[in-house]
Image (cartoon, rainbow, N blue to C red):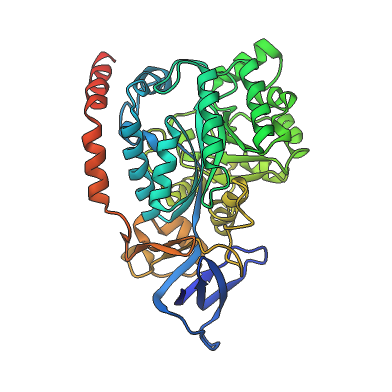
Amino acid sequence: MKQLIKNVRILTMDSDWTEYKDGYLLIEENRISQMGEMSDSLPLADQIIDGKQGILLPGMINTHTHTGMIPFRSLGDDVPDRLRRFLFPLEQVMTPELVRASAEYAMAEMLLSGVTAFCDMYYFEDEVAQAAEAMKVRALLGETIIDMATCDAENAAEALAYCENFIQKWQNHEMITPVIAPHAPNTNDQKTLEAIVALSRKYDAPITMHVSEMTYEMEEFAEKYKQTPIEFLQELGYFDQEFILAHCIFMTEADMVLAQRYRENVRIAHCIGANTKSAKGVAPVRGMLDHQLTVGLGTDGPSSGNTLDLFTQMRMFANFHKTHLADRGAFPAREIVHLATAGGARTLGLFDQVGSLEIGKKADIIIVETSSVNMFPIFDPYSALVYSANASNVSDVWVNGQQLVKEKQLVQANVQQIRETLYQQMNRFVVEAKRRAAEI
């Protein structure tokens, strides 16, 4: 099957920032086989798609989220210590069916906004994997490991056993990469954290974890170990494994120097929307990049960041970091688009497959239409993506060579059906959520 996309402005996001102002791209099976300017002789294809002068670029990569948390969206958004007062208690009523329905809804939302790959941490993660397989998206998926009773495990040991079974079931899948997902360094004891490193070594499985996110986390490690969480984890061997650190709001200069020594393994998922909504602060991303660390953008869960699209994150990233640094010229728009695409792919260890448009890479591709009122005029396509565009401007999406969004509609799924299924599964959750909200 050959699909020819023509009449598009192509931003390849490759190392040379190659662009084709009036370009075409050919997909053969699931890979990019040709691209160039329309003035060239166009190749033959089984299907021809007119891009209508849209911007064609690599699919966006959401480096950190919790797809099972759609039911929490807009719940207690302005309540202090929301994690311990709302989220942890309400997660006790999650069911496999509710997680599956929520994950499908979250993936539909991400696809419609141009996200083609993501990294997830939640409970009943096998349900998330089944949803990802059905929705045909690319995903890194990890079962949450935490030192408390949860909806699917009595303790961290049970969660570790679930995780190992999950890895065995899904390893070597074309689209799904199982990962190990300890919740945080302060929500697991040292014995569990050491067992996680051993499990990572056994299966060569990546680890993802919330790190240096909470003030009380930082205070606990300073008092108990006279270390930062990052220094503590490095001593346990985490930096010898493929390690995706979510947030790192309170990463210190010494932490960055330490992480730089392990920069082939250590990557950072930066969630500016969730971090600033919770009033925690702005992570030192400029310093991270200056220390040659890999950074990608994440939304966090739909409870923490509310939206699952990276257009929101790109604009918030620009506005908050420029303000934080008091430098309007900080982070040019194309650098921010890079964080949402190639940077995200590098963060998840996927850059050999996706993240840039290059011959031979997998065809994870999106088109952002330019006919809507907010998309005219365009002097700089990168600037338009960061400051003008929003999720509704995504018109077409391909993942692994399959078109999953066409003219702003899902091709192989129905959003209304997915929403209705989720609504039906939320009854018990809604009752408990209302009760807890009334107590605050």
- Can residue 301 be seen in this snapshot? no
In terms of image quadrants, where is residue 184? top right
Q: Is residue 182 above or below residue 5?
A: above
Count of numbered circles in the view: 0
* One can see residue 260 in this view: yes
Picture layout, residue 286 above or below residue 232 = below
Residue 423: quarter of image: top left
Q: Is residue 421 left or right of residue 238?
A: left
| x then y, percent, for residue 9 | 49, 73
Between 428 and 334, which is closer to the camera in this rendering?
Answer: 428
Q: Nearer the viewer, residue 317 or 88?
A: 88
- Where does residue 336 sit, x and y in percent of width and height? 55, 53
Left or right: 353, with 313 as reference point: right
Q: Quadrant of the C terminus?
A: top left
Q: Position of residue 287 (x, y in %)?
A: 68, 40
- Horizontal side of residue 314 vs 226, given as left or right: left
Residue in the picture at 57% in, 33% down: 180
On screen, residue 362 above or below 119: below
- The residue at 54%/56% (across/down) is 337
Task: Identify which residue is drawn at 60% across, 22% down.
Answer: 185
Residue at the far top in the pictured view: 224
Query: Viewed as shown, does residue 324 lie left or right of 106?
Result: right
The residue closer to the viewer here, 264 or 165, is 165
Q: In the image, residue 300 lies at what x, y percent? A: 46, 37
